[in-house]
Structures are given as C-alpha cells and as structure tokens.
Amino acid sequence: MTDKTNKTDKSQGKKIAVLASGSGTNFQAIIDSVDTGYIPASIELLITDNAQAVALKRAKKANIDTRIFYPSRYQNREAMEREMIKELKDREVDYIILAGYMRLLTSIFVKEYKNKIVNVHPSLLPAFPGDNSVKEALDYGVKFTGCTVHFVDEGVDTGPILIQRPVKVFENDTADSLKGRIQKREWQLLPRAVRALVTGNLKRIDERKWIIINE
C-alpha cells in the first residue's frame, strides 16, 4: 500500500488573483471550483479597472478582497501595473487569472509573471484574436469556433495554448446565442486549466507547446 502522507502536494498554499472588468461569470466559475476543492488554491484578490463591474459583487459575496485600479489616475499603463505588481507581491500571489479583463498587459507585468498568467478567449486561437472574436467568427462563416485557455505573453492572444474546446456554429446563430454557448464551455475549461496550473500538472514540450497531464 502506498503511503500518501509522505507525498508533497504541489498546490498546497498556492494563491491566485483574478483580473476582471465586467460581469465576472468566469470569475464565478473559479470561485465555485475553489469552494468545491476542485481548484486546490485560495483566491487572494480580485483586481478590476471598472468600479461598476459585477465581478465586484461576486467577490463581496464570496468574501474575497478587491482592489480597483483607475487607469485615469496613472500617468501610463506601466505606472498602474507597477502598483498592481506591488499589491500582488505583498499578498504573495503565485498565479494570475484573466477572466474578462479588458486591458492589455504590458511587458512589465508579463515578464514579472512569465508562464504564471492565463487568459480565456472565445475562439479557437490563433483564429480571431482580440475583441469581437465571436462576431468575427460568425461573419466569416466558420462551422466551428470555440474557446481557448492560454498563457499570456506580450502579444494579443498570442501566448502558448494550454487547452481548447470547439463549439458548433448553427445556421440561425446570432452573436449573442453563439457567445452564450461558448461561455458555458469557458466555465468548464478555465477551471480545468487553473487546476492544472496550481497543481503543477502542466508539461512543457517546447516554447509553444504545453499539455495537461495526470488528470
């Protein structure tokens, strides 16, 4: 019989922060997955750039600390991000999850947390990066689109892909109906990637290729 008590849990004590700008449905998926123990980590902080973000209400309900960074109060993006980094360092955050955060991160932030920031995007990258990806996929006439969880680098949705899932496009789809089905898939996919991240169950094949292992 294997004695599991001598094994070290790589995820023990891991801390995550979430960045969100809007309704925070993916943030809620992370909260729920932490609450059930599926993601064995603690959510230390929600950071937002939008004082009206519904994500703030979700954080309050879950007793998660919040911090609003107002872009207009800073000379530039780099100045704001330096303060964000300080906040994260003070809280000893290990990993950062972008869940509908609508601002591009600069190289200052990305380099500080290289391969420790993940984002969920509503397309099968590298197709349709950036904003309006759902409408662009629909207008293009694709038969399948989907969602992607990827590491964040200095480009626009160009970081190494961790996991993807397809979503079928129907003839009568609107941007809203298609977005709704993609979001439901995101709520499954993002927690799975975050779980792999905090437990160390990601294997790097090369600079671009990563796989989830030991699920």
Image (cartoon, grey):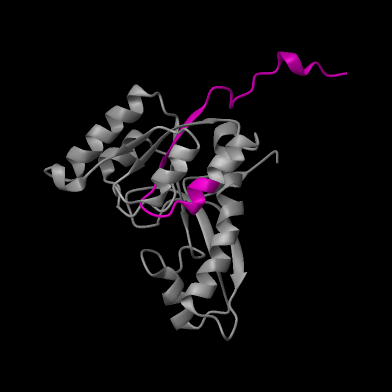
The answer to whether residue 187 is left or right of residue 15 is: right
User: Is residue 107 depicted above or below 130 in this figure?
Assistant: above
Residue 38, picture quadrant: top right
Residue 25 painted magenta: yes
Q: Nearer the viewer, residue 137 or 112?
A: 137
Q: Is residue 115 visible?
A: no
Specify the quadrant that holds the N terminus: top right
Where's residue 95, x and y in %? Answer: 45, 34
Residue 205, located in which quarter of the rendered image? Answer: top right
- Left or right of 144? Residue 112 is left
Residue sitting at x 32%, y 49%: 154
Residue 49 painted magenta:
no
Read off the magenta span.
Answer: 1-28
The structure residue drawn at horizontal position 59% and vertical position 42%, both measured from the top left corner, is 32
Q: Residue furthest bottom?
A: 171
Q: Residue furthest left?
A: 75
Q: Establish if 130 lies above or below 35.
A: below
For residue 80, which quarter of the picture?
top left
